Amino acid sequence: MQEILQRPAKILTQSQREAYFRDGFVGVEGLIDGDWLERLNRTTNEFVQISKEYSSQRKDKRFDLEPDHSADNPRLRRLNSPVDHHEEYWTFASTGPFVDVAEDLLGPSVKFHHAKLNFKWGGGGEEVKWHQDIQFWPHTNYEVLTLGVYLDDVTEDMAPMGIIPNSHNGPLYDLYDTEGNWTGNIRDAEVPKLDVETAVYLGGPAGSITVHNCRCVHGSPPNNSQKPRPLLLCAYSAAHALPITDLTKGGKYAETIVRGEPARWARFDPRPVLMPPDWSKTRYKSIFEHQQGDG
């Protein structure tokens, strides 16, 4: 941490960097400019239109759809791996301001891991239950983070992401249920231990970003507003953090160095990490599908 903080910042302020290391997350309002937002929204709207051709009966691996999604009432939960499906997303993830933020928090050599675009549709878009990310895609250490950008204004009633401060320094929780089934969320019996009343909900105008460490406990309630809440998420790691599973195997840009150089030495954190199901044998579903028990 101190080694990173001693480096000149690219885009964040020093206080924002210190907040990330102290709390495990930081939010910055309006960081992504209007040009990028226009480009990302134009591309995203293209995929919303394409999704109208599909349903829970006629599936497409690009889309995770709510059960009542239809051409007349599109209700996307997620665009899976958007960087694989349109170069505009990859240009943003590999050359845009996200890379500067990642360098400010991870150091000079940064790898891209994966991306997704969560929509959280209006009128009851599904909740994301409390969870931590790293159990889905374990690495050799915890210098892994997720960056998000809201593509539209997000107010309190639109289910902004909530993150529990300092939870990155706490325990990793079991994301299996008591019968050994992967659910992707912390068990209900464990939730009283989480200090959820301290959660900070990061919304803001279009272009606001969220950054959270892979160990942070986070989630979001249903979106009961009338507007969808599109949040483009990109995960990055320090170059010396190596993935343990093959979750992103076959991803067009998985493990691409986007800043600096490949690591010659891997780093290992002595703290253990929960292993997910063997994704090479069990189909990885979106967090919505796992948590809701559908798909």
Image (spheres, rainbow, N blue to C red):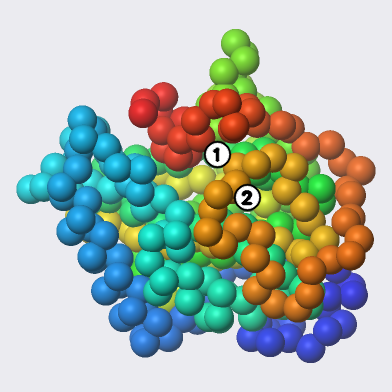
Residue at (69%, 40%) from the top-left corner?
245
Above-or-below relation of 7 to 102: below
Q: Nearer the viewer, residue 263 or 149?
A: 263
Mark closer to the observer (2, 1):
1
- Determine the image quadrant of residue 39: bottom left
Q: Position of residue 94 (x, y in %)?
A: 56, 74
**Disc 2 element:** loop
Above-or-below relation of 199 to 108: above
Q: Position of residue 50 (x, y in %)?
A: 20, 56
Residue at (46%, 81%) from the top-left corner?
32
Residue at (41%, 33%) from the top-left corner?
289
Residue neighbourhood size for the residue with mark 2, other residues' Cα within 10 Å, grouped as few (<14), some (14–19), many (≥20):
many
| Residue type (three-letter) at the residue carrying disc 2 | Ile
Residue corresponding to mark 2: 164
| Residue type (three-letter) at the residue carrying disc 1 | Trp
Q: Using the image, tell me which numbered label, if any, was put on residue 130.
A: 1
Q: Nearer the viewer, residue 47 or 125?
A: 47
Task: Name the residue at the top extreme.
Answer: 179
- Badges 2 and 1: C-beta atoms under 8 Å apart? yes
Residue at (21%, 30%) from the top-left corner?
57
